[in-house]
Image (cartoon, rainbow, N blue to C red):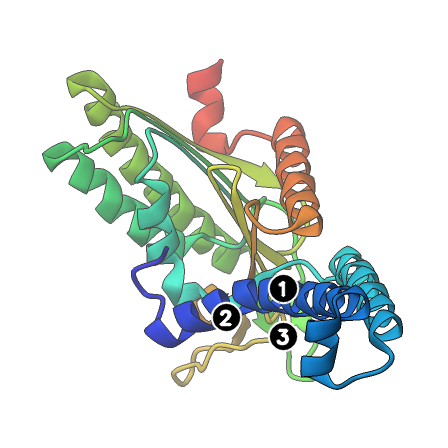
């Protein structure tokens, strides 16, 4: 149970669990009382009814139909999910680091929001590793060395204009993030007891999806506002520059129903496949050679 869960939410969940139990008990009680009243005269006289058996059978039919309707509703229930904002990523990172084996996968733009949360959490392991014994971080970012429509400079007519200098600036930013996280990872691995791996790879195309996977159990998915523009300072130009910090994310949990489990499994496989096809960034290619 989450510490952030309100008492009202707990009561609603408790009430939802009790409702079908009470309904079944009520229907079965009506059935048994009706049958008893049909064959035990004092009970029948006390109830002052005449159609006891018919009423009892009707309640039994209701009981069976109730179960059938509940099963039908469950089979068509939408996957359990909630929506959060990207600024809430810290909560999910902290929850992930409560496990002994931590696996975090990301696909998006620069990963700036996630970087700050990971940096703080990894530094915390240097002081108190807690239960964590291994950490694996994989980050997929766009290949900023390729011409792009987003990010890009906003033309006079609103058309996107590829801007190599802007792309290089974003690439340097991601390089700094990866090197900072890798430096902490190497120190943690060297000093123990936590083994940490951190790696960045590149995917082709524009940053459209923002995906975070935590310990293969939770997936957060949202869409960047690809038409978002920076507010320039004169005489600087405006850029199409998605702001991931304001992206809304849908949360799917493996602990949900069968549909939610399928969604999480699909995203896990998709990111694993993308990772296997992704290229190393140029600052890693020399080290890998």
The nearer-to-camera label among 3 and 2 is 2
The answer to whether residue 242 is seen in the rendering is: no
Front residue (pair 283, 120): 120
Q: Is residue 188 toward the left or the right of residue 204 in the image?
A: left
Task: Decide: is 155 above or below 77.
Answer: below
Circle 3 SS class? loop
Q: Secondary structure at mark 2?
A: helix
Q: Position of residue 246 (x, y in %)?
A: 46, 72
Where residue 219 sits: x, y (%)? 55, 49
User: Residue 248 placed where, x, y %?
Assistant: 53, 69
Pointer 1 or 3: first along the chain: 1
> Residue at horizontal 81%, vertical 63%?
60
Determine whether the residue tagged by mark 1 lies in a helix, strand or loop: helix
Residue 1 sits in quarter = bottom left
Res. 120 visible in picture = yes
Question: Who comes first in sequence, dot 2 or dot 1?
Answer: 2
Residue 208 x, y percent position in the rendering: 64, 59
What residue is shown with label 3?
227
How would you rate the neighbour count of disc 1 (Cα within 10 Å): few for under 14, some for 14-19, many for 20 or more?
Answer: few
> Vertically, is 169 above or below 48?
above
Identify the disc placed on residue 254: none
Q: CA distance from mark 1 to mark 3?
A: 56 Å
Foreground mark, 1 or 3, reads 1
Label 2 CA crowd tier, 10 Å (few <14, some 14–19, many 20+): few
Residue 15: mark: 2
Q: Are marks 2 and 1 in contact (CB under 8 Å)?
A: no
Residue position marked by numbered label 1 in the rendering: 25
Residue placed at 15% from the left, 19% from the top? 191
């Amino acid at each position: 149970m989450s510490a952030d869960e309100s008492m009202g939410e707990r009561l609603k969940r408790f009430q939802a669990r009790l409702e079908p139990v009470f309904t079944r008990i009520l229907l079965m009680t009506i059935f048994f009382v009706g049958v008893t009243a049909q064959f035990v005269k004092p009970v029948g006289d006390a109830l002052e009814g005449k159609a006891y058996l018919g009423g009892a059978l009707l309640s039994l039919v209701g009981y069976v139909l109730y179960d059938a309707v509940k099963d039908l509703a469950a089979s068509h229930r939408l996957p359990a999910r909630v929506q959060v904002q990207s600024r809430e990523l810290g909560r999910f990172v902290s929850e992930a680091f409560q496990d002994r084996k931590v696996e975090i996968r990301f696909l998006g733009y620069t990963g700036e929001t996630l970087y700050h949360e990971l940096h703080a959490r990894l530094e915390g392991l240097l002081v108190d590793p807690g239960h964590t014994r291994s950490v694996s971080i994989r980050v997929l970012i766009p290949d900023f060395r390729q011409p792009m429509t987003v990010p890009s400079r906003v033309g006079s007519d609103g058309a996107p204009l590829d801007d190599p200098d802007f792309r290089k600036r974003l690439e340097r930013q991601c390089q700094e993030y990866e090197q900072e996280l890798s430096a902490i990872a190497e120190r943690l691995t060297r000093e123990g007891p936590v083994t940490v791996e951190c790696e960045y790879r590149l995917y082709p195309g524009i940053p459209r999806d923002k995906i975070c996977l935590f310990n293969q159990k939770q997936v957060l998915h949202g869409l960047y506002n690809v038409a978002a523009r920076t507010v320039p300072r004169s005489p600087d130009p405006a850029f199409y520059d998605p702001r991931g910090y304001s992206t809304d994310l849908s949360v799917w949990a493996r602990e949900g129903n069968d549909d939610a489990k399928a969604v999480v499994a699909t995203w896990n496989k998709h990111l694993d496949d993308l990772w296997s096809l992704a290229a190393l960034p140029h600052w890693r290619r020399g080290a890998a050679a």
